[in-house]
Every structure is written in C-alpha cells, then in structure tokens.
Amino acid sequence: MLYRLIVLSGPLKGRRLTVERAPTTVGRDPACAIHLDDEEVALRHAVFEHNDAGLLVRDLGTMNRVLVNKREIREAHLRHGDEIEIGRTRFLVQALFQAEVEGQGAAEEKDPRRILGTTPRAVGLLVLFLVILAWYTWKPSRRPTPAASIVASAPVAPIVPGPVRPAFPEVAEELRSMRATLATIKETVEDLTIRAASAPQEPLQDPAGPPAPSPDYIGWLAVETVEQFKLPQDNSPDEARLFRLRLRAAPGATIEPEFVRMEAQVFIRESETRRIYPARVAVSVSSPEFGEEGVLADGGTAIATIQCRVPGGAGYLAKYYGFRLKVFYRDVLQAEVDRPRTLAADLWRETDGPAAE
C-alpha cells in the first residue's frame, strides 16, 4: 500500500508528498525529508514509518504536539482520510491502490442483476434501444411522396396511409430482449435503493464549535490545584513565572516518582495582531516531593514546581497570555491543565474557527 500526504495548510500548502518506504522525518531541520519552515515545529518533530499494519506516525519527543484528527498522540497508525497537524501545517492522508474485497457466494456472483449493476453494459443497451426506436419512428415520416416530382400546377392526389409493415423478426426479437434487460435494470436499481435506505447510518459529528477545555483529572494521577506566581523582577527585562502543582493519587493507586514526567508550554499574545502562539522559553521542572515513604499511594498528595522566564521588555511586542501543563505517568497522559481555561478555545478560533473580528 502506498500513501500520499496532501498539504492543506502551512508553508507547503498545495503540495502532494509521497511517503517512501524508508522512514520519513518531518521537522524544521533542512536535512529532514519533509522540511517545514515553521517556528512551532521542532528540528526533528515526527517521523512516518511503514510497518505490517500500514503507515505509522510517531512523535520524536518534542515539546510541541502532533495531532491526528484533533487528538494529541505519541504514535498512531494512519488510515485513508486521517488529518495530521504538525505546527501550522495540516496533512491529509491518502491511501493509493486501495481495494475493498467483500466475500460473496458463487450464486450471487452469477446473478445477472449483479453483473449489470457493476458494468456499463446496461447503459449501452439502453442507448441502443432508444436509437432503434427513434429510427423506426422517424423513417416513415421522411419517405418522399409520389407527388413530389409532379409540376406544381398539376393536382396532387391525396395520400392514403397504408398498413404499417411489421418489423423484421430478428429486430422484434432484439427489442424483446432489450425490454427484458431494461426490466432487470429497473429491479436492480430498486433493490440497491432499498438496501441503501435500510443500511445503518453513522451519526455525523458537528465540526462547528471549539473543543472543550481538557479535564484536570485523568487516570491514576490528578492535578488538584495549580498556583501561579509572578516572581520579583531583577535587572533582566524578562518576566519570571512559577507554577506550583498539588498532585493527588487516585484511590488504590501507588505512584512511583521515577515514572512521573511533567511538561509546560507558555503562550504569549502579540500586542498588535492579538495572535496567540507558543513562546520559546527555558523551563525548569522540579521532581515532586513524595515525602519519606518515597511513593504516593491511595489518595496521597505531593507538591511539584515548574519555573520559566517569559520574554519581555519595552521593545518586545508580545506579552504573557497563559500556559498549558501536562502530567504523565509511565508515558501515559494523566492530567492537562490550561490557564486561562479558555486557552483551547482561543487557539481553536485562530486555526479552524471563524476569523476574529
């Protein structure tokens, strides 16, 4: 199976890219097979790989996300029609030489209505029948009258229509065959119409409306509270921020600190365009304080802190807007916190939603 990526948006909009058998990397590095000149894309952001199950996309561990059908993934198998989002670029997956084989019995394969429903033969026979019928209808009216060669001054005898001559036997037989074929076509169309009406319809998903903010509790580990502090200014024009998280283990769960991982992403807004985008900032993440026992068990709590510097100063045309925090346990996303809580909707309006006034 061959796959092709159709670029819907971004620097390569309109391009059609064939995914080769060798691993195909995507990133801002010019050495990548698919080079994206986009500040929201990492140097080596993701890779497309072929395996026995088809085409696989895998995140190479960047801070920015890889979305498949609007869902964040670490790796996922792709199907025909899937949509991938990397930075500002959206790809549409197209599978080439795709065939669907449905098992059918021998009696069903020999049914003439099935054969006529899948070939253009029925259309050809219908056209031939209409041509022959029109020719036989038109021919007697075009036959010249005996008076056509008589001088205009001579009286013209009235033409008495004679009996209609019957068609040749072989033509009549062919017409009977075509009538039977048309009846078969009609039955086939009615059968297909009934099947289509009785087939279960998949509910359509309404794409309108922004995605809801992510919940703060998923799985074994939850973010109970998040406190945000603006640290005192020093001589640097940058703005220092501190995030303090209180983590709580789910009842019956035992959380080991070495498998806990946290990520933070800071967003800034341009003063003139009001556009929101991720800022390139240095983030310092501390390990959670699990107390003397060294584990977090059965509803226990722990404190973790994340510190970062947001670019600022009189000459900087953007200001701090918000943040997104993610907590993983054993590489499984446990909690995702957006501040402000409308951050996901604000980002959606700038990409897929209606243009801001």
Image (cartoon, rainbow, N blue to C red):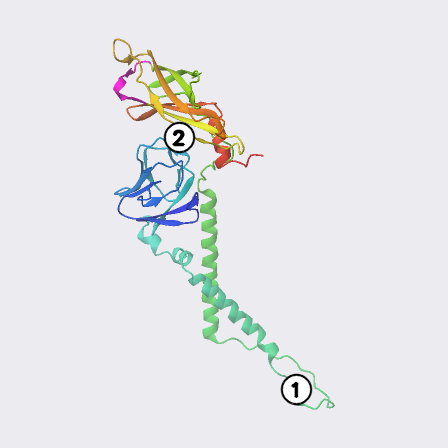
Q: Quadrant of the C terminus?
A: top right
Percent of width and height locating residue 148: 66, 86
Is residue 206 visible to the viewer in this orientation of the structure?
Answer: no
- Indicate yes or no whether the magenta region holds residue 252: yes
Q: Label 2, label 1: how many angstroms apart (C-alpha)?
A: 96 Å
Instruction: Please tell me how crowded label 2 is: few (under 14), some (14-19), or many (20+) other residues with Cα within 10 Å.
Output: some
Q: Which mark is residue 148?
A: 1
Earlier sequence position, callout 2 versus callout 1: 1
199 to 65, vertically: above or below: below
Instruction: Please tell me how crowded label 1 is: few (under 14), some (14-19), or many (20+) other residues with Cα within 10 Å.
Output: few
Residue that protrudes farthest toward the top in the picture: 292
Q: How many marks?
A: 2
- Residue situated in front as seen by the camera: 226 or 352: 226
Residue at horizontal 29 percent and vertical 26 percent from the top: 331
348 to 159, vertically: above or below: above
Which amino acid type corresponds to the residue marked 2 in the rendered image?
Arg
Query: For numbered disc 2, what is the local secondary structure?
Result: loop
Q: Which mark is residue 280?
A: 2
* Boundaries of the magenta span: 251-261
303 to 163, vertically: above or below: above
Q: Which mark is residue 158?
A: none
Is residue 158 visible to the viewer in this orientation of the structure?
Answer: yes
